[in-house]
Image (cartoon, grey):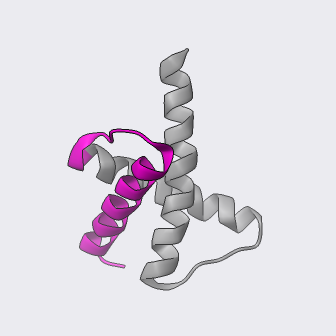
Amino acid sequence: MGIFAFLFVGLIAGWLAGLITGGRGFGIIGDIIVGVLAALVGGHILGWFGIFTYGMIGSIAAAIVGAVILLSLIRLVKRA
């Protein structure tokens, strides 16, 4: 996957996870950063359960799972 595709997946995942968790988001750069980190987190978490994703849709799905988890943790820390 090229760098632009990776950034696109990060942007989509960060934006959708923000909608799912009911947040305002972190802006376009923040959403990309959260999405890219979430793609790594989501890939590892799904890998632990023996679920492997392929292609653009699979990458976005794994990134969304990771982004929801990551955003939930960020909001939990911000409240404390």
Count of all numbered marks drawn on residues in the image: 0
Q: Indicate the position of residue 80 as horizontal and vertical percent values.
A: 55, 14
Which residue of the protein is positioned furthest toward the bottom in this rendering?
55
Residue 11's place in the image compared with 28, above or below, is: below
What residue is at 49 percent from the left and 32 percent from the top?
Answer: 74
The kind of secondary structure the magenta stretch mainly shows is helix
The spot of residue 22 in percent (x, y) is: 45, 42
Relative to 12, residue 33 above or below: above
User: Which quadrant holds the N terminus?
Assistant: bottom left
For residue 44, what is the image quadrant? bottom right
Relative to the observer, which residue lies in front, 44 or 58? 58
* Rendered view: 29 above or below 3: above
Camera-nearest residue between 39 and 2: 39
Residue at the limit of the structure toward the top, as seen here: 80
* Residue 57 in the image, given as x and y percentages of width and height: 46, 80
Seen in the image, is 73 located left or right of residue 48? left
Please check the rendered image and state whether residue 10 is part of the magenta-colored stretch, yes or no: yes
> Residue at image x 58%, y 64%?
43
Q: Which residues are magenta?
A: 1-29
**Which is nearer the eye, 25 or 36?**
25
Vertical relation: 55 (above or below) 10: below
Residue 79 position, x and y percent, is 51, 18
Q: Residue furthest right?
A: 49
Residue at (30, 77) in percent of width and height:
2
